[in-house]
Amino acid sequence: MPSLRSVAAIAVLTAVAGCGTEPAPPSPGAVSLWFSSLTGSGCAPTGNGKKQLPADVETLVARWTATLLTKAGTSEKKTGTQVAAKSALAAGVWDVNNIPVTDSLDLDVYGCSKDKQVAWIGRNTGLKVEEGPSQPARIFLAPIGKLACTGSPAGEARLGEPRSLAGSAVLSSGEVVIAGGVSTWNKDTGEGTAGKKVDSYDPRLGHFRAGPDLTVGRILPHIHAIGAGRQLLVVGGMASIKRLSTDGDKFVLQTLVPDKIETAAPAIKGEVVDLTAGTGSAKALKADINLGAGVYVLSSSIRLDKSILFVGGVAPAGEAQSVAHRLNNPEELGSGGNGKLDPPIDLNSPRVRPALLSFADGTVIAWGGAVKKAGAKAADQGELIGATATPLSVTGPAALVDDEHLVTIAPVAAAVARTDDVLTFLVAGGVPVKDPVSAAKAPTYLVTVTKSSKTAELRAVALPGDTKLRAGLFGVGVPLDGRRALIGLGLVDLAAPADLAGHCPKAVPTSDCAIDSAWVVQVPDPLGPADQPTQLSLVHAVGFGEPRFGVAAAPLPLGALVAGGQASTRSGSTALVLDDMAAVLTVLPSSLDPKTICN
């Protein structure tokens, strides 16, 4: 057998190809492991490809699952595990033997520390193992519970340009696409203009690839995967935004909205982007295709199994909208068709940037964003949207239900548990409708919606010690496995309240207060008494080193991707306002026992 080479940051494994379901003689194949390193606070460029293993890795463990086709035409799975000590890797030999020939190999690699804990983890799926020498496949290893910068010699470490308030979507392959956003910011006038860049992040490789530009720039666009390939439907968004204020010393709702609504939307209402290698640029949709509420400024959308639902927003006349539109068969748009737009669904409240979550049958929960001239109350907080819209009956502790700051515009919501009838999610951030001068007053709480009874039960939450879970306007909320979620970041206020001072280290007269941290929390099961705060577990506290809002965030198979963001909306700052940062936060799967892996 040919000997394998090992370089310190590229650990070379050998895969063995076989025929059918019977083991075959060993056959060399290679899997290159690219490691990420951290320097300083926050996320700095990594040392990927610098031929250096992480210092805290003592053992590498590879677990693989091969899907095989039997002679009877059925499929079966075979699994295997190989272990290599650091000393063996330094010697240059590590053979992962007896992997059968397959068109679908899933491979996880774990880096174990001296104390037998999983410190690094990476995954690649759908690999093809052929008889004889195979082509190398890469796995991007990232440290557990820390921000790890993306990047490798084969791709881009960061976004194609600095930006905030971009749209994001997850493809069926697990790739994350980030499109549009604020690409230029005038610190003197407090104005931002939209960009056209599209970047796709492949978690198997750990880097970005540039996609075709959008036909027009879009801030906060709706982007959703369509079709079986790598196509995106991109709808709506804003062409520009401006920091407006009725009080020079206060953050107000108008901070990041267009100066004039009627001229805010991009000239082209929708387009399809094909990310397949070798394809051309984006294609504008036909002018006569009606995409309903998706074209309204600050509307929300959610991708369902066979449709996309667009909800609320602000019409050109400046009025908040109490309507939703369901676009069926969106895949047709990718092949030149029109899809089907159902008749409008009348909402019970006008809604601006509500959070949207769904049940398995396509019923959607719209939460927050309720705007009424007389003010919104808890009874207006949520509604179920199916063929019609039905308000939810809200219950819970009086102190929370009666909180005048409960109803917020643009809240962050992350689902932590779902059955066919019950959905539980965390809510944080946004701007209270009652008193829209600061996001600091927005409560963080837990909601359990029961579809059959049309009820929403609210629960207060608590974390160990003095930790306060919160997010500001345009913060992040990413659902993770094991009843966990990533919550945090966002724009809060100019004059930092005392309890936020630790999260706003640069809150000076020429800057905003934006949160510089995020938290991975776990929700217990069962929840416990409804009249007592639900005690959450703090899994990881993540410092970004700099204040951030408008960060694009999306789930990854092993955690979350965060990219871009904005430090301030104020004028006079000498720091760079927009960021092209891109990082992954890797979280150990809840079903994994690290001591079992590392022993």
Image (tube, helix red, strand yellow):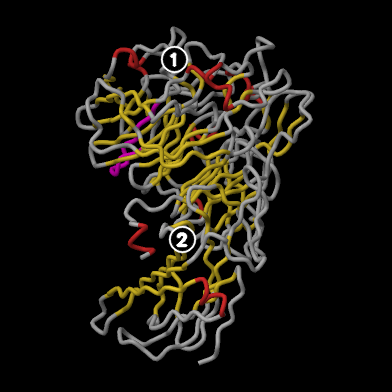
The disc label shown at residue 114, or none = 2
Vertical arrangement, residue 526 with respect to residue 84, above or below: above
Q: Residue at x 73, y 21 (%)?
A: 510
Q: Amino acid at mark 2?
A: Lys
Q: First in sequence: mark 1 or mark 2?
A: 2
Which residue, given by chain and number where applicable, does mark 1 sit on?
Answer: 405
Q: Vertical placement of 442 versus 580: above or below?
A: above
Instruction: Find the magenta span and give its range.
Output: 358-367
Q: Give whichever of 193, 102 is nearer the camera.
A: 102
Q: Quadrant of the C terminus?
A: bottom left
**Was residue 360 drawn as part of the magenta stretch in this picture?**
yes
Q: Secondary structure beneath disc 2?
A: loop
Measured from the top left, where is residue 485 in percent x and y? 41, 40
Examine the rendering and report whether any part of residue 402 can be seen: yes
The amino acid beneath tag 1 is His
* Image position, residue 271 (x, y; %): 58, 46
Q: Residue furthest front?
A: 115
Q: Dot 1 surroundings within 10 Å: few (below 14), some, or many (20 or more)? A: many
Pointers 1 and 2 in contact (CB under 8 A)? Answer: no
Query: Residue at left 50%, top 30%?
Result: 299
Whether residue 312 can be seen here: no
Residue 142 % position (x, y): 53, 56
Question: How far is disc 1 from disc 2 in space, using C-alphas?
Answer: 48 Å
Q: Is residue 343 magenta?
A: no
Q: Of discs 1 and 2, which sits in the foreground?
A: 2
Give coordinates of residue 584: x percent, y percent.
54, 50
Is 472 placed above or below 526 here? above
Q: Secondary structure at mark 1?
A: loop
Residue at image coords 43%, 21%: 443
The front one of 10 and 196 is: 10
Q: Is residue 284 left or right of residue 30?
A: right
